[in-house]
Image (cartoon, grey):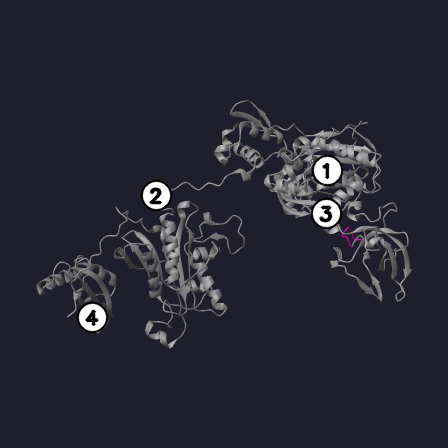
Amino acid sequence: MKFTLSWLKDHLETDATLDQICERLTAIGLEVEDVDDKAAYKPFVVAKILSAEKHPEADRLKVLSVDAGPDVNGGKPLQIVCGAPNARAGLVGALARPGDYVPGIDVTLGVGKIRGVESHGMMCSEKELNMSDNHDGIIDLPQDAPIGTSFASYAGLDDPMIEINLTPNRPDCTSIHGIARDLAASGLGTLKPHAKPSFKTEGETSVGLSIDLDDAKLCPGFGLRLVRGVKNGPSPAWMQTRLKAIGLRPINALVDITNFMTFDQGRPMHVFDAAKVKGDLIVRRAKEGETVLALDQREYKLTPNNVVIADDNGVESIGGIMGGEHSGCDENTVDVLIESALWDPINIAKSGRTLGIITDARYRFERGVDPDYMVPGLDRTTELVLELCGGTPAEAKIVGYKPHAAKTVDFPFSEVKRLTGLDVSTEESRHILTRLGFHVEGSGERVSVTVPSWRPDVDGKADLVEEVMRIHGVDQIKPEPLEKLSSVNAKILTTLQIRTRIAKRALAARGMLEAVTWSFISEAQAKLFGGGDRSLKLANPIAADMSDMRPSLLPGLLAAAQRNADKGFGDVAIFEVSGTYETDTPEGQRRVAGGIRRGTASINGAGRLWSNKDKGGGKPVDVYDAKADALAVIEACGLPMANVQIEKGAPSWYHPGRSGTIKMGPKIVLGYFGEFHPKTLAALDVSGALAGFEVYVDAMSEPKKKATRTKPALELSPLQVVKRDFAFVVASDVEAGAIVKAATSADRKLISGVNVFDVFEGASVGEGKKSVAIEVQIQPVDKTLTDEDFEALTGKIVANVEKTTGGVLRA
């Protein structure tokens, strides 16, 4: 929102300086975004050409003798070389001297020589001073222009321009009058009253008017007045200066009046040439496929979602957004129809966005204009038309308009202290609201506040508190420290938040890079990974291949790895800790840590290097790499690893023989890991050695609360660990994990660990059989174990394995 200082002072009686006004605007919530104090125009002076002689070396140049007044060059004339065709003796214009910056040509002048003749400045054109695009000659001022005085002051170019960054909830300040009202309420002057328009009408508006809409809120009111016998020409200089200053191009008096009303009063208006309107005007929905040639010379195709003003010729205007070229006013207009209407903000916003039209009218209507000013705005516009164009006004036609029903808010003044911490007296709060136009009824600590029609953004108590706060001064709120927590060591983050961070750190420590992938994937990918439910389809996807919420992190990670491989980075280890979606309920959203490794990107390093061979580096990643990553996440999250079980089998997108399921007990599934099924990779158009995992962070049980945060005493046995090896012959389908579990449970006090170190299948152990060798670590605690103790423990281990798995000790 742009306005000039002088325009503001048309509405505000104040002695405040430009800096004070800008500071106050920002303080009351109307943030000043830019200020142009017009300092660039200060150096230019009004000067008179005393003589204009032909340049001795150039036919098109003249050597001027210029009088710039007694304060320039000691009152002596300046010699200036000029090529303007209208340069002549006696012309009064604008002079720029050496050292002055000329904005139109972006040049700082100096004393120069042009074809051998010194030039001490230049006489400027309008384009060189950014006044217009006219560059046909230098500025030609009236002969009575005061020589030696400031050209900016004489031409009205010294009027500072202010631009504020207006938030969408302040439609009342889309007018200069509204901004002045806010400044006056803050104590920076007095709002100037404007006399009510007074004129006599003759006859009725002959053009019929009706509203034919299925929803009355689309056009809550429409006013129309005919003014006969107008003389339309250029608007007066004061109005053109106002409009030019804020970047608008003057067109003619009738159009300029509507633009002036838009900014001056925040009341967008429109004018029709009555002679071009055929039949009656009707407000209706556009018909499918109807078109209109708008005032911007573009043709727009309309739909029934657009509200238009039409006559027998068809659409004449897009309601509240832009008028049509056919019925526009020009210098031949004699009878004019002045329109003042109300429109639905939501419909205006949708129509403007759909059609791609941005206008000052749309900007105001989609935020909400003052409904009570619809008829007074029509009268004020009529008054300006009569003042500038003459004519005879007819009685106005008002259709569909109902008086505004004001909102009333029950307001306890104590809310100001409760919500802001400001100690504002009841009397000051009442005074602030009254100055802003609110009507306060009642006495005491609780009052009834009636909201003015120009404040559609005020709905409740908190809004009124905001009004009091911003006028009293947000800077008056004293900073205070937050209240101390009841316990210094109290946990702030939830367990899930903590484990999410821990999982990221654990995977990053294993050499993996964090990735952030889309939460949306294609329907085919969703079905491939167990999703595709209709409840998880997006109503308005950003792309055709992003139609479903992801049931797994793996599709995005696999695609990211392939993109890296396509660019020459085949050895990739990436992870993501984020959400997946099983249903459209909050309970159906899971927190998952997922990751993949590609190529040779193992924890020992990637690539073919001789020094890595003994460390397992250089070989393609496999199921064991994925298993190690998954278990690292679970261990980092604090789960007891002794209770974690590995079982065969995994979802269909994993390789059936090179994958596994991680469980905690018989029911809780913590995640899956493995190499990927070739069909899965083919469906995703992904290739290479790939292994991955997903761990459900939200499936992990809450840690047990400890009675004390003090660490227990460290107890180490002074006795040496003893290791014993066992080899069991079991059926080929028996899992090694079952043997480990059975051996461990033989004596949990003495057995500190069990590891599988060999698996053998062959004719010597029998068909359908295999030999699994385990190493059992025995840690004596109380005493050194005797041979009898070891024999007893060995018997328990063998018996447990035989009972659980059917295995027998290999001879």
Mark in front: 3 vs 2: 2
Give the CA separation, mark 1 to mark 4: 100 Å
C-alpha span from label 2 to label 4: 66 Å
Q: Closer to us: mark 1 or mark 3?
A: 3
Find the distance from the CA under tag 3 to the CA under tag 2: 60 Å
Q: Which numbered disc flags the more N-terminal residue, 1 or 4?
A: 1
* Residue on which the image places disc 4: 766
Left or right of 525: which side holds 182?
right
**SS for tag 3?**
loop
Front in this rendered view, residue 232 or 696: 232
In the picture, residue 66 is in which quadrant? bottom right
- State whether residue 549 is above or below residue 270: below
The number of discs equals 4
Quadrant in which the C terminus is drawn: bottom left
Q: Residue 261, which numbered label? A: 1
Quadrant of the snapshot with the N terminus? top right
Q: Amino acid at mark 2?
A: Ser
Residue underneath mark 2:
487
State the separation of the CA atoms marked 1 and 2.
Answer: 61 Å
Task: Give the camera-side residue of 603 and 451.
Answer: 451
At which x and y percent is residue 336?
A: 80, 36
Three-letter code, disc 4: Gly
Crowd class of label 4 (few under 14; some 14 to 19; many from 20; radius 10 Å): few
